[in-house]
Amino acid sequence: MSETMARLSEDLRFPAGILEERALAALRDAGADESSAAAATRAMMHASRLGVDSHGVRLTPFYAEELRTGRVNSRPALKVRRTAAATATLDADHALGHVAAYAGIEEACRIAAESGIGAVGVARSTHYGAAGAYALAGAERGFIAISTTNADSIVSLYSGTTPFHGTNPIAAAAPVAGAKPWLLDMATSSVPFNRVLLFRSLQRELPADVAAGLDGEPTRNPHLAQMLMPLGGENFGFKGAGLAGLVTILSAILTGASPDPFVPPMNPDGGSVQPYDIGHFCLAIDPERFVGRQAYDGLMARYLAGLRTTPGKNAAPALAPGDREWRVMEERERTGIPIDPDTARFFALA
């Protein structure tokens, strides 16, 4: 659910505890083992709390159906293999991507505590939702953390006429002494495809340079949009396409997973249950092994103070990555988390 959809459902707000309880129960009921259900619920609630509603609890029905069809392994046996002083691989056994990604970043942090840097490549995984959930998990343990994943093709190349890359997000988080982490979570596509579906239902034009028809020409008509454009749009989409390629290299090629064009679609016609084989990449860096923790904390505080006091247009405050999300989280802690009517019905809340 996009931010726009969140505004449409202000009357459907619920405490985080209720949504967490319903999501966890639905995944258990679909057959997920406890670690899988807990990891998926944790990641979805991260997104719902911070306002990334497209990857929040609204995805519970999707994951439950994937578990029931057997496309996602409900009781995986994750296998970690240490390959060098600072590297490891993780075979996800077609698990829910959330449990694989949390395990990957936790292993990366363990290695970084020993070696200064820890890098873990994850293969044979599935959709993992909001990339920021895993980068944040690393930052909360004191490390600078990066998480990436590839996905099925839905984004064109620069000036392309057919989908090639996935939305291929990059998330990074850095600890900040005495405050919430610096948190960047971005797709390398112009917008999520969910935004196109929303604008179809609202009968509204899309923003410029976010989607294209099958001929590759940009369109603002959501009913004609068949693929997303890379970040940067018609004029600068080579930047987004290049970043998407980097994510594919790190997440799929480096790990031995399937590159984007060879990943089965998330919503296939005919009810295919072919496994995804998506890959993730997890990186953790220990500041202590570089400038030292005390110097790092001081420099981060100085940097962020400078950023936030830089004048903006119309006296608007400058925001560091994550500032908006932390404000949304505080507001939702007071007023509840908005959900769409379909999700409310699935949770028996409407």
Image (spheres, rainbow, N blue to C red):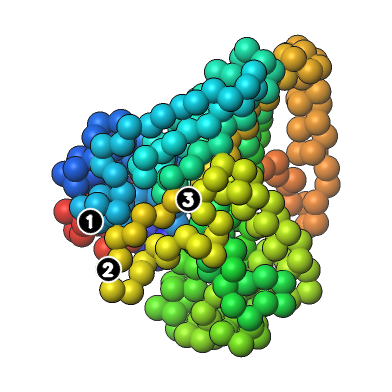
Residue 28 on image: x %, y %: 20, 40
Determine whether, in the image, residue 162 is placed left or right of residue 151: right
**Residues at marks 3 and 2 touching, judged by CB atoms closer than 8 Å:** no
User: Which residue corresponds to mark 3?
Assistant: 278
Determine whether, in the image, residue 5 is placed left or right of residue 192: left
Residue at 76%, 26% in the rendered image: 300
Mark-to-mark CA distance, 3 and 2: 19 Å
Determine whether, in the image, residue 269 is placed left or right of residue 165: left
User: Which residue corresponds to mark 1?
Assistant: 69
Mark-to-mark CA distance, 3 and 1: 18 Å
Q: Earlier along the polypeptide chain: callout 3 or callout 1?
A: 1
Mark 3 crowdedness (10 Å alpha carbons): few <14, some 14-19, many ≥20: many
Instruction: Give the quarter of the figure containing the N terminus.
Output: bottom left
Determine whether, in the image, residue 318 is placed left or right of residue 188: right
Residue 84 on image: x %, y %: 63, 22
Does 180 appear above or below 342? above
Residue at 57%, 84% in the rendered image: 213
User: Which residue corresponds to mark 2?
Assistant: 271
Residue 222 on image: x %, y %: 50, 81
